[in-house]
Image: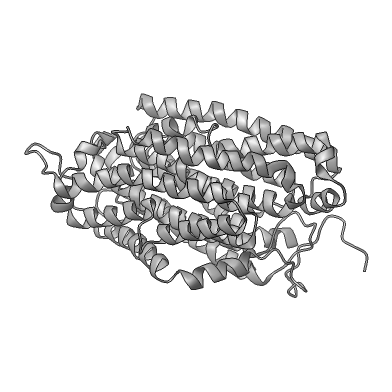
Amino acid sequence: MNHWVALLPEVILSLAAMFILMHDAFARASGGGAGADGAAGGGAGDGRMSVDCLVTLYSIAGAFIASLWLMDASAPPDAMIALDGFRVAADTILCGGALLVVSLSRDYLSREGLRSPEFHALILLALVGMMVLVAARDLILLFVGLELMSISVYILTGFVRKNPRSSEASLKYFIVGAFASAFVVYGMALLYGATGTTRLATAAERIAAAPAGGDLLLVAGIGLLLIGFAFKIAAVPFHMWAPDAYDGAPTPVTSFMATGVKAAAFVALLRVLTVDLGGAAEVWKGAVWWLAILTMIVPNLIALSQQDVKRMLAYSSVAHAGYLLVGVVAASELGRSASIFYLAAYTVVTAGSFAIVFHVAGRGDRNQRVQDYRGLGWRRPVLGAALLVFLLSLAGFPPTAGFVGKLYLLRAAVDAGEIALAVTLVLTSLVAYYYYLRVVWKMYFEAAPEDAHTPPPPRPGFNLAIGTCVALILLGGLFPGRIIDRAREALADVPADAPAPGMVVQAEDPPSP
């Protein structure tokens, strides 16, 4: 029963997904649903929210509240499920990103005539996998969460079945994801062979008790696990799938992939490497150092030549994985908290950016080239101003949360003696200024041709969601101290002194009284 309590947020989301699927099945059987390729649910075209959209939003909010309720709980060190600040911080980012994606995707689903119930059910199931992934303290549970997340997103990537690009992106993502999962499973098997346990806390104790560098089985296991996670976070040279998958997927799904999938995989990697496998840092630190260097340099250079805004943001997303890896290499309390802060800011700004991209692109995503943004700042001032803030945050301009996040990552790298990483972070951020500010130049300093596509005025709900993103980015840039302090408190890897009454998750083999 204690395990069910510890997984309460995931249970809420799973039940909501089942309800949406069953509700749609009965509605269609009774003749009340939409056609196979139409948008289902109440009033997609009349401004009213469909039932499945409401259920999705309320269930995500309920899962977030349940995560906060579990904040005061604790678990034995060798429990399968984590009950700590690390998990709450990750759940906050994941639920917040999912709420933004679902809120902003309504217009896209209606415009493209896509079925809403399947979309929302898959979003919920993917979110369940993400939350299991960040809460897992056992290798088997870690893999279950990883696969549930991945399979759901594979389907979402090919959600526009009539679009060949979407089907191609889904197939590429599936093939590469299968290879990544194979690496993860093989790495887990070798870790089990080296430590004799699937429990991460127990494995950490056994690694700390013996020199890790001399155990070839352990070194190979960590290496394969790192390769698998590098695929999931799209780190160079394992990033080749990301631009094509991001470009071909429906834009709300691209936003979900660039925020939720990356956040969940990165938080899991951060916990496993810096906490559970911290005693084997000499094994993985050099490899992660090179991953960070390459992931900051290569995609930023490729993005300079991109003429498609969506593809440019895809390469930008890969580059931001490199910035986040700087915090992993630092392997300190400041490095972890700076990574979480930056990940939260990146999630908000990416969700908002892709929402504006699909709104400007129009039906079929026909208008997403850089040239299509000429004069947007004057034709649609609200959208232009919001995109300006998002691009400045991605580039790292003050007073945005993106600037503060990079500043904390820079400080963590310097404090850890990683001067080369700090210099690379600064120089690649300067390179990124060109392709971000190029869009700003088009919006405000080039006139749109007479036959240019003008996006329709956004609905009030869309403006509210975009405005929330802008406010969060500016508040994070102007008042970062309290947020980063809370992140440090949440991510302090010191176990609780005593469990809260009635909220203890027992391990399979509890210690004797």
Q: Is residue 447 left or right of residue 481?
A: left
Confirm whether residue 260 shows in the render. Answer: no
Identify the image quadrant of residue 357: top left
Q: Whole-percent x and y of residue 503?
A: 72, 69
Q: Residue furthest right?
A: 512
Identify the image quadrant of residue 506: bottom right
Report the residue at 79% width, 45% height from top: 198
Q: Please say if 307 is above or below 492.
A: above
Report the residue at 69% width, 34% height from top: 224
**Front in this rendered view, residue 361 or 194:** 194
Q: Is residue 457 left or right of residue 346?
A: left
Q: Pick the quarter of the image with the C terminus.
A: bottom right
Q: Residue furthest left?
A: 450
Q: Please say if 170 is above or below 202.
A: above
Q: Is residue 178 left or right of residue 309?
A: right
Confirm whether residue 504 shows in the render. Answer: yes
Q: Whole-percent x and y of residue 442?
A: 19, 44
Q: Pick the quarter of the image with the N terminus.
A: bottom right
Which colour scheme appears in the figure?
A: one colour
Report the residue at 24% width, 48% height from top: 440
Q: Whole-percent x and y of residue 71?
A: 63, 69
Q: Please say if 13 is above or below 372.
A: below
- Total tally of numbered discs in the picture: 0
Q: Whole-percent x and y of residue 330?
A: 62, 53
